[in-house]
Image (cartoon, rainbow, N blue to C red):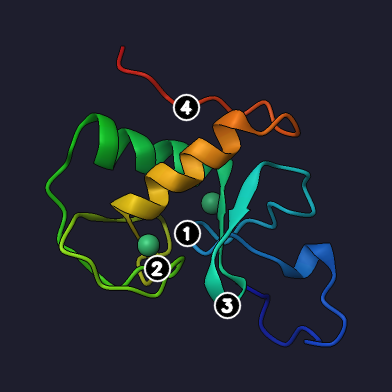
Amino acid sequence: MHRDGCDPDNVRPEDVLCDFCGAAAWAAGKACVEGHRGSLICGDCLSNAYRSVVLRQDELPSAECVLCLEVREEPAWRGRRAEAAACRRCIKQSAGVLHTSRHWDWVKPANP
Ligand SMILES: [Zn+2]
Ligand SMILES: [Zn+2]
């Protein structure tokens, strides 16, 4: 997401925030994955989401996903910013993208 009051014609890295924790992950040079309409999930949130929804298979209610804008019949994860949810498909896809990207050293969490 973009910081409140940022100039849409001149979006700076520090204006791009993780939808799930609000961190300026982009400016901090952290791994992150973009979704629809300027949405963003940072690597830290993605790790938490992956552990919850994929590894532990937590039973979470479905919700509109900020990354794909769909409401899917599957668990949707929420981070510190409770208004944003991510569906399991997007979590898996994003994890695949970051895991295989040579640009980031993000590694998919594994079962202990
Ligand atoms: Zn985050
Ligand atoms: Zn989604």
Q: Position of residue 36 (x, y in %)?
A: 54, 72
Seen in the image, is 27 located left or right of residue 69?
right
Tell me the SS state at disc 3: helix
Label 4 vs 3, first from the N-terminus: 3
Relative to 68, residue 56 above or below? above
Question: Which residue occupies 35% across, 66% down?
Answer: 82
Q: Find disc 2 in the rendering and name its residue.
A: 84
Real-space CA distance between mark 4 and mark 3, rounded to the nearest whole angstrom: 25 Å
Q: Quadrant of residue 109?
A: top left
Q: Position of residue 40 (x, y in %)?
A: 58, 61
Q: Are marks 4 and 3 in contact (CB under 8 Å)?
A: no
Label 1 vs 4, first from the N-terminus: 1
Q: Find disc 3 in the rendering and name its residue.
A: 37
Real-space CA distance between mark 3 and mark 1, rounded to the nearest whole angstrom: 15 Å
Label 4 vs 2, first from the N-terminus: 2
Q: Are marks 2 and 1 in contact (CB under 8 Å)?
A: yes
Seen in the image, is 92 located left or right of residue 46?
left
Tell me the SS state at disc 2: loop
* 4 vs 2, front mark: 4
Q: Which mark is residue 20?
A: 1
66 or 16: nearer the eye? 66
